[in-house]
Image (cartoon, rainbow, N blue to C red):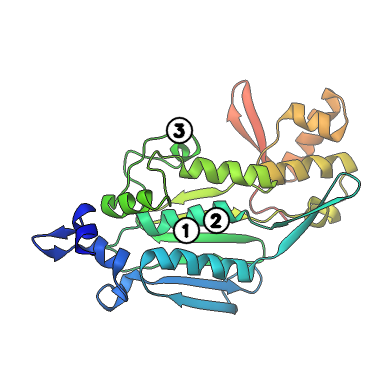
Amino acid sequence: MQQALNQLDLTRNGQLTVAALLLFGQRPQHFLVQGYLRCGRFKGNSEVEFLDMKVIEGDIVAQVEEAMAFVQRNIRMAAKIEGQLARKERWEYPLDAVREGIINAVCHRDYADSGNVVVKIFDDQLEIWNPGSLPLDLTVDDLRKSHESKPRNKLIARAFFLIKYIEQFGTGTGRMISDCREAGVPEPEFESRASSFRTIFYRTISAERKFGSLGLKEGQVKALQHALNKGKISRLEYEQIAGVKSATAKRQIADLVKKRILAKKGSGTVFWYEIVKDNP
C-alpha cells in the first residue's frame, strides 16, 4: 500500500494527503465531514417529501458505486417499441451519463467547502450537485464542445484516470450529451453558480401529456415532442415533422412562441427554438 501511495504522489513528508484519505481511507468522513455523498428520492418535483434517502460514507470510489445503486433503485425501466415486434427496455435516464455526472461531482468538487455532493431524484428530472463552481476560464457553454481538462483535484483525477473512471481529456460532458442523444432523452443541462455546480438530466415527457390540454394540432404536438427529446428544433425540422409547408410552419411556430411554449434562440440567420422551461 505504501508503495502505491508513493507512486500516486499521495504522501507529503511521510504524511497522507487529503486525496489519499478520500481514495483509500476506510471512513474518511471521520476527518472530513464534507466527504459524505447524500442521495434523495422526492415525491413529485419538489423537495417536500422524501420517498427514499441515503447518506453514503466510505472512500470516494465506493461512494460512486453506492450512489449508482441508489439511482437504479429509484428510477424506472422504460419500454420502447422499435419496429413492429422489437420491444427494447432501457432506463429512463442513461446510466453511463448519470455515472459520469456523479464521478465528475466527486472528482472535481471543492473539498475545502463544507457542503456535500448531492444526488436528487424527482419525478421528471435527476440532479447532481457538488460544491465548487467551474474554473474562471471555463464556461458552461465550453462544456458542450471540445475543451481542455482542468481538474480542481489533480491527485484524485489522476487516480480516477488510472482506474478508468475518467479520461482527463475534457470529454466527460461530451459523452454525457452523446449518451442522452443516443437514448432519445433530452440533453443534460449544466449550471455553474458562485459556489456550486449542478448537472440536470430530464426524463422524456410525452408532449401529448404536457401540451394535450392546449388544443394544439397533431403536427404541432409531434414537433414539440422532438423539441422535448432533442432540446431544440429548427424551422426546417418543424416543417418536416409537422408535415406542413414553410408559411404554415412560420405561422404555427409564431403561435407557439406567443403562447410561451417555444422560445427563439440564436441570432441572425442561425436560430432555433427551445421549449420554455416554465411552460404549462
Name the amino acid, label 2.
Val
Mark 3 to mark 1 CA distance (whole Å)? 20 Å
Position of residue 140 relative to residue 35, above or below, is above
Question: Which residue has dot 1 on it?
Answer: 102
| Quadrant including the N terminus | bottom left
Q: Nearer the viewer, residue 250 or 152?
A: 152
Question: Which residue has dot 3 on it?
Answer: 146
Rendering coords of residue 61 (x, y %): 40, 63
Would you call the spot at circle 1 few (<14 residues within 10 Å), some (14-19), or many (20 or more)? many
Rendering coords of residue 117 (x, y %): 41, 65
Element type where label 2 sits in the image:
helix
| Quadrant including the C terminus | bottom right
Q: What residue occupies the far left of the structure in this picture?
A: 13
Q: What residue occupies the far top of the structure in this picture?
A: 269
Name the amino acid, label 3.
Ser
Quarter where residue 232 is shown: top right
Mark 2 to mark 3 CA distance (whole Å)? 20 Å
Quarter where residue 230 is shown: top right
3 or 1: tag closer to the N-terminus: 1
Residue at 32%, 53% (x, y): give it: 159
Name the amino acid, label 1.
Ile
Mark 1 to mark 2 CA distance (whole Å)? 6 Å
Residue 117 visible somewhere in the drawing: no
